[in-house]
Image: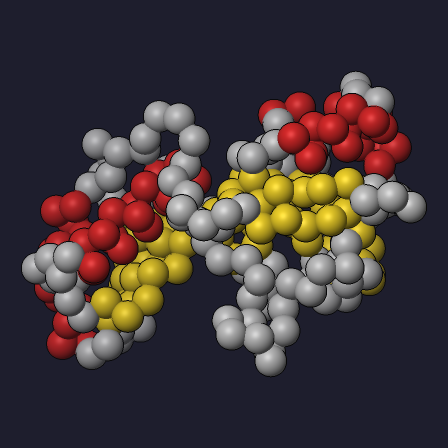
């Protein structure tokens, strides 16, 4: 069981540092379970925000913070073997036109053909590990290990909305046009962020995602 590193983050939150993404996912799930069960120290929790190596836990009142720190310190976390936990909902399907400008570069970096890159991407069981970078941007994990590629040496000043991309162990879809250094495999017409939708984000942590190849 790993020791948690607890850092105060303002008057109403604790930032918990762990060693990696597997522990992040296990800790976030353990905290949500404790909150739902109203375990001692967790009753005041209002938000649980996972990231790559941290989990931010916020409470409603500053007075709830000492009890939360004690509860977190006693919780500990063990990264489970096997795939990370997902919710019970059906996977979110995202149709993709695999016409990205970096598809050939990804093929060269991985030693795969273009068709093998597409097959590896569509056949992977992706999971939304956490959100960030921009509203609606979900970091997807669980992909074929052969698809792990570095970011571009020179980031683009503008990546089009809907670009489907790879970087490191993650895949993602750009919810809006923005600078970015990820390797672009293709694009989708699916709207990732819509303020008129409830919730606005199409993808939430714990959601499963399946990419589906579309024609040109």
Residue 92 is left or right of residue 211, and the answer is left
* Residue depicted at 54% across the width and 46% down the height: 91
Q: Quadrant of residue 85?
A: top left
* Residue depicted at 24% across the width and 71% down the height: 59
Residue 160 locus on image (x, y percent): 81, 61
Residue 43 locus on image (x, y percent): 15, 67
Q: Is residue 21 above or below residue 48?
A: above
Q: Is residue 39 above or below residue 43?
A: above
Q: Can residue 134 be seen?
A: no
Q: Quadrant of residue 100?
A: top right
The residue sitting at the left extreme is: 40
Q: Quadrant of residue 19?
A: top left
* Residue depicted at 37% across the width and 44% down the height: 24
The residue sitting at the front extreme is: 90
Give the quadrant of the N terminus. Answer: top left
Viewer-nearest residue: 196 or 146: 196
Viewer-nearest residue: 200 or 60: 200
Residue 99 is left or right of residue 123, and the answer is right
> How is the rendered protein coloured?
secondary structure
Residue 93 locus on image (x, y percent): 63, 49
Viewer-nearest residue: 105 or 81: 81
* Residue depicted at 27% across the width and 55% down the height: 32
The residue sitting at the top extreme is: 111
Q: Can residue 93 be seen?
A: yes
Residue 25 is left or right of residue 74, and the answer is right
Residue 98 locus on image (x, y percent): 83, 42
Residue 82 is left or right of residue 154, and the answer is left
């Amino acid at each position: 069981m790993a020791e948690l590193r607890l850092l105060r983050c303002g008057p109403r939150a604790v930032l918990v540092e762990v060693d990696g993404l597997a522990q992040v996912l296990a800790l976030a799930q353990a905290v949500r379970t404790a909150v739902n069960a109203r375990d001692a120290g967790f009753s005041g929790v209002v938000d649980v925000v996972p990231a790559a190596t941290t989990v931010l836990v916020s409470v409603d009142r500053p007075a709830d913070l000492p009890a939360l720190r004690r509860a977190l310190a006693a919780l500990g976390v063990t990264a489970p073997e096997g795939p990370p936990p997902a919710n019970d909902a059906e996977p979110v399907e995202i149709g993709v036109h695999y016409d990205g400008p970096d598809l050939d570069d990804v093929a060269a970096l991985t030693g795969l053909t273009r068709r093998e890159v597409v097959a590896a991407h569509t056949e992977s069981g992706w999971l939304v590990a956490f959100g960030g970078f921009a509203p609606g941007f979900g970091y997807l994990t669980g992909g074929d290990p052969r698809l792990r590629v570095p970011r571009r040496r020179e980031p683009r000043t503008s990546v089009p909305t809907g670009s489907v991309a790879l970087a490191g162990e993650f895949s993602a879809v750009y919810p809006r046009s923005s600078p970015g250094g990820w390797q672009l495999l293709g694009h989708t017409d699916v709207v990732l962020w819509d303020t008129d939708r409830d919730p606005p984000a199409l993808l939430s942590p714990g959601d499963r995602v399946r990419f589906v190849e579309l024609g040109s």
